[in-house]
Amino acid sequence: MLLREDLLTNAKQSVERGREIVDRQRVVVHNMERAGLDTEPNKDVLRTFERLLAKFEDEYARLSRL
């Protein structure tokens, strides 16, 4: 069974990693836009990553209040 501290640590790591992924995808979209390429599929991926990050952040906040 995981302890609260373990869950909190895992949630924090998910938030940190999620932020890195979102930031990297934003760079990809930006670079593709500068190159004049179609970015719609990449923007869809970015929106998915942003939604997942929001869920990770919500879970971290919930665990932090316990």
Image (tube, rainbow, N blue to C red):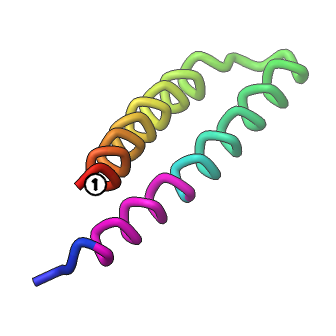
Q: x, y percentage for residue 2?
A: 18, 80
Q: Residue furthest bottom?
A: 1
- Residue nearest the viewer, comparing 40 with 51: 51
Q: x, y percentage for residue 39?
A: 66, 20
Quadrant placement of the C terminus: bottom left
Local secondary structure at mark 1: helix
Q: x, y percentage for residue 51?
A: 40, 30
Which residue is rendered at x = 41% and y = 43% of the image? 57
Q: Is residue 22 left or right of residue 11?
A: right
Q: Which residues are magenta?
A: 5-16
Q: Is residue 37 left or right of residue 7?
A: right
Q: Which residue is mark 1?
A: 63
Which residue is rendered at x = 80% and y = 26% of the image? 30
Give, as a three-letter code, the residue at label 1.
Leu
Q: Is residue 65 above or below residue 11?
A: above
Which residue is rendered at x = 48% and y = 25% of the image? 47
Is 6 magenta? The answer is yes
- Residue nearest the viewer, comparing 52 with 38: 52
Q: x, y percentage for residue 44?
A: 49, 23
